[in-house]
């Protein structure tokens, strides 16, 4: 059963590390599977057209090292490499595929909980020169919640990776379309995007926002929204039918910002770059404000 954090406005469901999702992609610690604001759901799932697999995302799942987990390039096929927040994954080819479900040897997890806060600790013992301790704290406030991360490098090698939250959003289960408006804290740079996938042209790019002229039946994706420039880590999604908005603000600047979505879900993704020498510790946070539109 998921653990529930509640206050007068919010209800968050959080799965324990070994509960439900145990795939090799997303962080097992503090898996926020659903969020309700004033009893209205604001979260969705990665896919609705398939039976839910162990590698499918939902709610507010985060991931470390989407393109190259720790030590993957120097690990021999058949040996193990680290995926932060998961454990050791068995390498079976020379190309890492984040969508593949790898064999997992889980890290050690510990959880401390209260009515409005839950803290998960992931301890990865030294292997192939890498080791770390990840602390992830989810805490409610009046009209939102904060996810605080602390990562310590306990290994012999430098940790270079990134982390993002996939943010599977769907306000009141409404389909993506004319009722949604996504705003950014920086001007969009379409000519500098890394990738543009918008086959139906239903996602409309403005100066610093994205709107829709209909419900997309195919997936859309835009990468490198800021054109590689370092910008303030914030987005705001409004649903004009439900009059509910949600805003994410990172405690860090970012130069990597993506957007993915489909018929039923939209996912703005702010990436945080991490570089840690042995013995060093870093901390960052993501704050989510949920509000009614005046």
Image: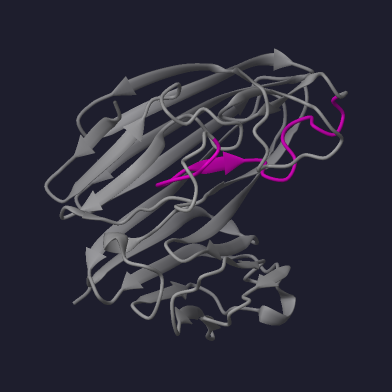
Q: Is residue 259 above or below residue 3?
A: below
Confirm whether the magenta stretch covers residue 246.
no
- Which residue is painted at 51% across and 27% down in the image? 22
- Answer left or right for 270 relative to 29: right
Q: Quadrant of the C terminus?
A: bottom left
Residue 82, image x and y in percent? Answer: 69, 26
Confirm whether the magenta stretch covers residue 70.
yes
Residue 159, image x and y in percent? Answer: 72, 33
The residue lying toward the viewer, choosing from 192 and 212, is 212
Q: Is residue 255 above or below residue 31?
A: below
Residue 227 can be seen in this image? no
- Which residue is painted at 38% across and 25% down in the image? 16
The residue lying toward the viewer, choosing from 171 and 238, is 171
Residue most extreme to the left: 8
Colour scheme shown: one colour
The residue lying toward the viewer, choosing from 216 and 182, is 216
The residue lying toward the viewer, choosing from 249 and 174, is 174
Residue 90 can be seen in this image? yes
- Answer left or right for 12 relative to 138: left
Residue 189, image x and y in percent? Answer: 65, 79
The quarter of the displayed image where residue 140 is located: top left
- Answer left or right for 276 relative to 270: right
- Which residue is painted at 44% across and 32% down in the image? 136
The tally of labels here is 0
- Which residue is painted at 55% across and 57% down in the image? 270
Q: Quadrant of the N terminus?
A: top left
- Answer left or right for 57 relative to 282: left
Residue 117, image x and y in percent? Answer: 28, 33
Q: Is residue 16 above or below residue 212?
A: above
Main secondary-structure element of the magenta-colored stretch:
loop
Q: Which range of residues does the magenta coloring cover?
A: 55-75
């Amino acid at each position: 059963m998921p653990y529930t954090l509640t206050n007068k406005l919010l209800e968050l469901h959080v799965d324990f590390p070994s509960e439900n999702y145990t795939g090799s992609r997303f962080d097992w610690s503090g898996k926020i599977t659903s969020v309700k604001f004033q009893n209205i759901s604001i979260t969705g799932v990665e896919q609705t057209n398939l039976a839910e697999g162990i590698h499918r995302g939902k709610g507010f799942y985060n991931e470390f090292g989407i393109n190259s987990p720790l030590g993957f390039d120097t690990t021999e096929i058949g040996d193990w490499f680290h995926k932060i927040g998961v454990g050791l994954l068995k390498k079976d080819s020379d190309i890492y595929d984040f969508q593949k479900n790898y064999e997992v040897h889980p890290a050690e997890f510990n959880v401390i909980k209260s009515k409005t806060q839950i803290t998960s600790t992931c301890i990865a013992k030294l292997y192939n020169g890498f080791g770390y301790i990840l602390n992830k704290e989810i805490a409610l406030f009046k009209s939102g919640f904060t996810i605080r991360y602390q990562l310590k490098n306990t290994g012999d090698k430098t940790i270079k990776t990134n982390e993002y939250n996939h943010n599977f959003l769907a306000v009141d289960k409404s389909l993506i379309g004319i009722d949604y408006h996504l705003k950014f804290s920086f001007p969009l740079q379409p000519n500098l995007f890394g990738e543009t996938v918008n086959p139906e042209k239903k996602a409309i790019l403005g100066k610093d926002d994205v709107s829709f002229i209909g419900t997309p039946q195919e997936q859309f994706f835009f990468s490198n929204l800021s054109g590689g420039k370092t910008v303030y880590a914030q987005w705001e999604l409004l649903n004009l039918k439900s009059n509910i908005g949600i805003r994410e603000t990172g405690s860090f600047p970012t130069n990597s910002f993506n957007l993915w979505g489909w018929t039923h879900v939209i996912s703005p993704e702010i990436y945080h770059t991490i570089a840690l020498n042995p013995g060093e510790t870093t901390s960052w946070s993501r704050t989510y404000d949920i509000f009614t539109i005046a």
